[in-house]
Amino acid sequence: MAMAHQLYHVDMGKYFKHENEWRLVKDEPKWMGTFMTTSSTRQKKSGDGAYATSSDPSASIEGDEYEATQPATRPLGKKNQKRKANVGDTASSDLGYVPNSEMIAIGKAKLGFLASFEKLKTEELEVRKEKKKLYKAWLLKEYKDIFMEDTSEMNEVQLATHQRLVEFAMNELGMS
């Protein structure tokens, strides 16, 4: 284990910090060395083509008599298994997936909805502006009527009330 830590440090330039996690997953099939199609030791081919292991260190070794073992492929992780199972729904691309036709239709419907929403929002703003203009025009007409009202036949209370209305109108119009 110490040698593995040293090799990791030399290769990666940092210390291995995940030993506890490694101890938890080392016995899982994905990480065990039992996947190998053959053992990790070299095997010598006999003359009849059968494999034989030699425990004799003095046995002669010739390059073409040995075949290097090839590790089996690792099993797929959960996400890749799900992705592979859903190949009918989506196809792989540079982006990671390509949406199916149903998702494209939903996206187009959302874009259409957003466009119509923006159009309604713009129309509502224009209606509000038009209402403000109409309200201002009505208000100016009312103020004009207050300014033009005949005060010659008003009593003192009516004149005081009229004077306050005129002052209010002038403040609202920014004329004071």
Image (cartoon, rainbow, N blue to C red):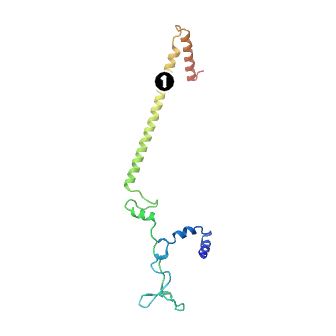
Figure check: 101 above or below 28: above
Q: Position of residue 116 (x, y in %)?
A: 41, 42
User: Which of 111/71 is in front?
Assistant: 71
Where is residue 40 drawn, in percent x and y?
Answer: 50, 80
The tally of labels here is 1
Kind of residue indicated by mark 1 = Ala
In this view, the residue in front, 39 or 155, is: 39
Residue located at (56% from left, 15% from top): 163
**Which part of the image, by quadrant, shows the N terminus?**
bottom right
Q: Is residue 54 toward the left or the right of residue 11 in the image?
A: left
In the displayed structure, 116 sits above or below 143; it is below
Residue 16 against residue 167 in the figure, above or below: below
Query: In screen coordinates, is 168 left or right of 115?
Result: right
Residue 66 in picture, x, y percent from top left = 48, 86
Quarter placement of the C terminus: top right
Q: Quadrant of residue 170?
A: top right
**Can you tell which quarter of the image residue 19 is in?**
bottom right
Q: Nearer the viewer, residue 63 or 17?
A: 17
Q: Residues within 10 Å of mark 1 (few under 14, many from 20)?
A: few
Q: Residue at (45%, 38%) from the top-left corner?
A: 121
What residue sits right under mark 1 in the picture? 137
Q: Secondary structure at mark 1?
A: helix
Task: Name the residue: 48% across, 24% down.
Answer: 137
The vertical placement of 1 against 83, above or below, is below
* Position of residue 157 measured from the top left corner of the image (x, y, whole percent): 55, 11
